[in-house]
Amino acid sequence: MKRKTYILILLCVLLSVIVAKIYLLNKKYPNPIEEPYIIGETITDEIFSVTLNRMEIIDGNELAKRCPEEIVGYHSDGTPYQGNEIRVLLAEISVEKLKNVTDTFDFSVFMCESNAFGNGVNPSIFMKLNPGVSIQREQINYKEARKVTLPFTMIQEQFRYKKQWERIEEREFFVVYSLYPVKKMFVYKADR
């Protein structure tokens, strides 16, 4: 009987320690503050400002027109995804350097999110849509603005249910620039 009491007390103490650690961790690192921006608004950090000019979602057929011979991925049988199996969120942004420093701009930091879906910039499509622009170390001169298109690819198999894919254009998407401590993001919700 005493052994069961000791085990019960030990479990209570252990559980209290775990709860206290979780509480202290959440107090030290709280959830980020979200700062949503819309088309036409500007996100500013210490060195750069980023303005969202426009966003659109295109399918694989339109992608084939803009980037011929681009393959987004393959089915398990080795055939490439095509047409309606592909969607690409295109975000046209303008980046301006605010300080006269030697820092370069990294376009690969942007992420696209929607509910549980998330994806980074597709580097292959980025290079085709923005010839001559480096995805990671783009040199931008002081007070110069650079306009680029960020492509975020989606394939049908990334979405669990067929209805999610059929209504992809109705979803709310976030193009995230920074995550912590402030989550700065552009919001895109297609017109219904």
Image (tube, rainbow, N blue to C red):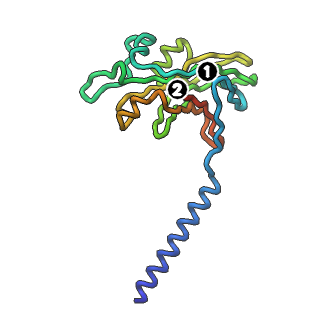
Q: Which residue is mark 2?
A: 192
For label 2, count other residues whose C-alpha is less than 10 Å away and answer few (under 14), some (14-19) or many (20+). Answer: few
The kind of residue tagged 1 is Ile
Q: Is residue 45 above or below residue 54?
A: below
The amino acid marked with disc number 2 is Arg
Q: Which residue is located at x 42 percent, y 10 percent?
A: 65
Label 1: element kind: strand
* Coordinates of residue 82 in the picture (x, y in percent): 34, 19
Are the residues at dot 2 and dot 1 in contact (C-beta closer than 8 Å)? no
Residue at x 71% of width, y 28% of height: 47
- State the CA–CA distance, disc 2 to disc 1: 23 Å
Camera-side residue of 88 and 30:
88
Task: Please state the total of marks drawn on the protein image.
Answer: 2
From the viewer's perspective, is residue 63 above or below residue 11? above
- Tell me the mark number nearer the camera, choosing from 2 and 1: 2
Percent x, y for residue 68?
40, 11
Q: Is residue 168 above or below residue 132?
A: below
Check disc 2 and report its element: helix, strand or loop.
loop
Q: Residue placed at 62% from the left, 39% from the top?
A: 183
Q: Is residue 172 left or right of residue 161?
A: right
Q: Can see residue 56?
A: yes
Residue 135, located in which quarter of the rendered image? Answer: top right
- What is the quadrant of residue 189 in the picture? top right
Which residue is disc 1 drawn over? 93
Q: What residue is drawn where x is 50% and y is 26%?
A: 121
Horizontal side of residue 191 vs 32, given as left or right: left
On residue 60, the disc is none
